[in-house]
Amino acid sequence: MRKNTAAAEMVRRTAYFLWEQDGRPEGRSFEYWLRAKELHMRQMAYDQWLAEGEPGGRAIANWLTVADEIDRDD
């Protein structure tokens, strides 16, 4: 499966920013990528929840939808 190019670029840029902020430690690129991906997923899930009118009990469904959005084909 190919990644969503726009989402992948956002994650990559955020990971790079976080890495730079921490002093550019070597050998931890995957750790920074995971942190950046989670940050974007949380923001996207929150934005979706707000767009739906803040319904209760939608946290897991929104999280799964966002995960699919980040990993989907273009």
Image (spheres, helix red, strand yellow):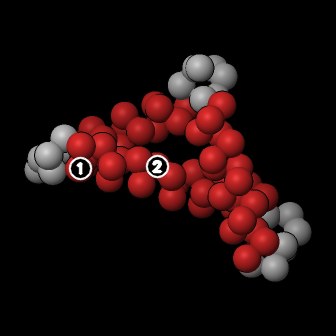
Residue at 58% from the left image edge and 20% from the top image edge: 73
User: With respect to residue 18, does 9 lie above or below?
Assistant: above
Residue identifier under label 2: 41
Mark drawn on residue 50: 1
In this rendering, would 7 be left or right of 67?
Answer: right
Q: Amino acid at mark 1?
A: Leu
Pick the quarter of the image with the N terminus.
top right
Query: Where does residue 27 sit, x and y in percent of width and height?
Result: 86, 64
Could you say which is closer to the camera, residue 13 or residue 38?
13
Picture residue at 72% right of the left edge, 65% below the top: 17
Left or right: 27 in relation to 60: right
Q: Evaluate whether residue 31 shows in this view.
A: no
The spot of residue 70 in percent (x, y) is 53, 36
Task: Tell me the SS state at disc 1.
Answer: helix
Disc ID at residue 35: none
Tell me whether circle 2 and circle 1 mark residues in contact (CB < 8 Å): no
Residue 22, by quadrant, is bottom right
How many residues crowd around disc 1 within 10 Å: few (fewer than 14), some, or many (20 or more)? few
Q: Of tags 2 and 1, which is closer to the observer?
A: 1
Taking the view exactly as shown, the residue that stands out farthest to the left is 56
Q: Position of residue 67 (x, y in %)?
A: 46, 38
> Foreground residue, 30 or 69?
69
Q: Quadrant of the C terminus?
A: top right
Q: Nearer the viewer, residue 5 or 32?
A: 5
Instruction: Please tell me whether residue 5 is drawn above or below residue 35 in the rendered image.
Output: above
The three-letter amino acid code for the residue at tag 2 is Met
Picture residue at 63% right of the left edge, 47% below the top: 10
